Amino acid sequence: MRTDPILEIRGLRKSFGALIATDDVSLTLMPGEIHALIGPNGAGKSTLIKQIVGELSADGGEVRFEGQRIDSLDAAARARLGLARSFQVSSVIPDFTVLQNVCLAVQGGSGRSYGFLRPVLSDPALTEPARFHIQQAGLDGREDFAAAALSHGERRKLEVAMALALRPRAFLLDEPMAGMGTEGAGQLVALLSDLRSEAPILLVEHDMDAVFRLADRISVLVYGRIIATGTVDEIRGNPEVRRSYLGEEA
Amino acid sequence: MSRLALVNIAVLGLLIGGALVAHLTGHAFLVTLATKAAIFALAGVGLNFALGYGGLVSFGHAAFFGIGGYVTGILASHAMSGTPLTTLPYTMNGTNEMLAIWPMVLLVSGLAALAIGALSLRTSGVYFIMVTLAFAQMIYWFAIGWPAYGGEDGLSFYVRNTFPGVPTMRPLNYFLICTALLLLALGFTAVVMRARFGLALQAARRNTQRTVAVGIRPFGIRLTAFVISAMITGLAGSLYADLNRFVSPAMLNWHMSGEIMVFIILGGVGRLMGPVAGAVVFVTMEHLLGGITEYWQVLLGLVLLAIVLWAPGGIVGMLSGRGRDNAH
């Protein structure tokens, strides 16, 4: 089995003035795993994700993706390498249909957006993979719905379909469970669990149920520092984690 | 047929049918008025490409309208006087052939947009509006201070440029030339907006962050759209110069930028036929009300206000009963 990490972060640092948002963070994402990143609000989880995807530049340290340093690449280039991301608040193109949204992602991943003549919707190179990923995400039958008309849970699935369309080598999912009802949450957990076979997932999540059910490893981020990394059981049993974050929940 | 398609056909039918009726009943002046509407519509189609579909609120499109006009006027005046434009590095003569002038217009307005866009697209929102306005005003003041081509007084060239096999001075002929270019630009826009480029451009307008997250860089997409947009508006400027056989710095003034924007807002932002509907209504109002009072724009202002408040989809949106066109 391959043991090189897909994604490796070493000594990442970022501060905003006096506020240290990322304090010497190192973590790895191994093939086939779901690595959950948990921590209280304001711990710097989103800041960390933004540095990994290239939306924010780090002050120091390095990010390696499949062994290659990607620190100098912009966000679009990192996406094309297969770093697929979902957002804390569902982020799709609201007045596009489901099919158009996913075609956009296929097109983006292909790196060819300068076609001026052929209609997107009659280009099988876009629509075929798009329909496949829509089905994978469990949205079949919804292709021609405007994204704005979808339910919250369906929009989450649309984001998953868009992430899949990038032929991802790694997923970065920022609170995918946020705002989901109990039933929807169950479905989404099953979908995320299936995603693992496509590519490993770095999962930022507040829903501890979902984290404990999905994660192979958990890292706990507090005040910009990783205070512990381990399996579900190790983290549940870690006294420092219980004190600083889990509280009575666990 | 959808209601939107009917509205689109009605708008074009009104413009073309109106011109034909005017011609058959011997109202040459009204044909010229329809020509003006077609040219303004073309300028609006250009701006709509960037503003409507790409969300790039350029307040400087008069620059391209005026550049199109000046390129036309300069080439025509040199052809008329028989003096070369330049002898270095080689001799370049003027021309009065529309088919030679238009490519030159497209080239010059495209290059100007490449430079202006490359700088102004580093900003967004209100800064983008101001930077595009500033560039256009720079060109305006430059034209005023350039005595070789008339400076403040503008430049007349007396004879309309020629088109092979068509006597362009006949009003209906010139109307048909302008309308043919308008239809080409509309068809081009419709095709591009359904293709990959249009998908990326519209996605970047609605959600830049998401567009980047699927691996598309908005800057290049937007710059390309800005250049295409300017080329179309530049072509309209060339036709306008030929309509009047006269160019002046007024074509470059920010009033002109505002007017082009008004066509789009009246007709419907990001709608294929929006600029056409807007330009027809604008020219009609100017003709009917302008004869009564020189303050007719007060009324235009009220109409604009009503549209912005109660019908943000413009005339086309109001009549077709839909939100924005989904170009895909």
Image (cartoon, coloured by chain):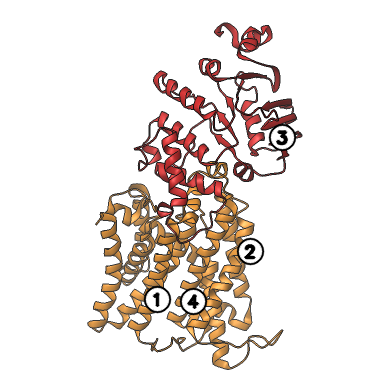
How many angstroms separate mark 4 from mark 1 (CA)?
Answer: 10 Å
Q: Residues within 10 Å of mark 1 (few under 14, many from 20)?
A: many
Residue picked out by circle 3: A63
Q: Residue A122, percent across and down?
A: 40, 54
Q: Nearer the viewer, mark 3 or mark 4?
A: 3
User: With respect to residue B221, does A74 lie above or below?
Assistant: above
Q: Residues within 10 Å of mark 4 (few under 14, many from 20)?
A: many
* Mark 2 touches mark 4? (CB < 8 Å): no
Q: Residues within 10 Å of mark 3 (few under 14, many from 20)?
A: many
Taking the view exactly as shown, the residue that stands out farthest to the front is A1
Indicate the chain on which mark 2 is placed: B
User: With respect to residue B239, does B201 lie above or below?
Assistant: above
* Residue drawn at x 37%, y 71% as measured from the top left: B37
Any mark on residue A80, and which? none
Say which element carries label 1: helix
In which quadrant of the rendered view does residue A222 lie?
Answer: top right
Residue at mark 4 shares a chain with residue at mark 1: yes
| Left or right of residue B45, residue A107 in this image | right
In which quadrant of the rendered view does residue A41 lie?
Answer: top right
Residue picked out by circle 2: B115
Colour of chain B as rendered: orange
Quadrant of the image for the C terminus of chain A?
Answer: top right
Amino acid type for the residue under numbered disc 4: Ser
How many angstroms separate mark 3 from mark 2 (CA)?
Answer: 35 Å
Q: Nearer the viewer, mark 3 or mark 2?
A: 3
Indicate the chain on which mark 1 is placed: B
Amino acid type for the residue under numbered disc 1: Cys
Amino acid type for the residue under numbered disc 2: Ala
Amino acid type for the residue under numbered disc 3: Val
Return the disc, 2 or 1, that comes first in the chain's sequence: 2
Any mark on residue B178, and which? 1
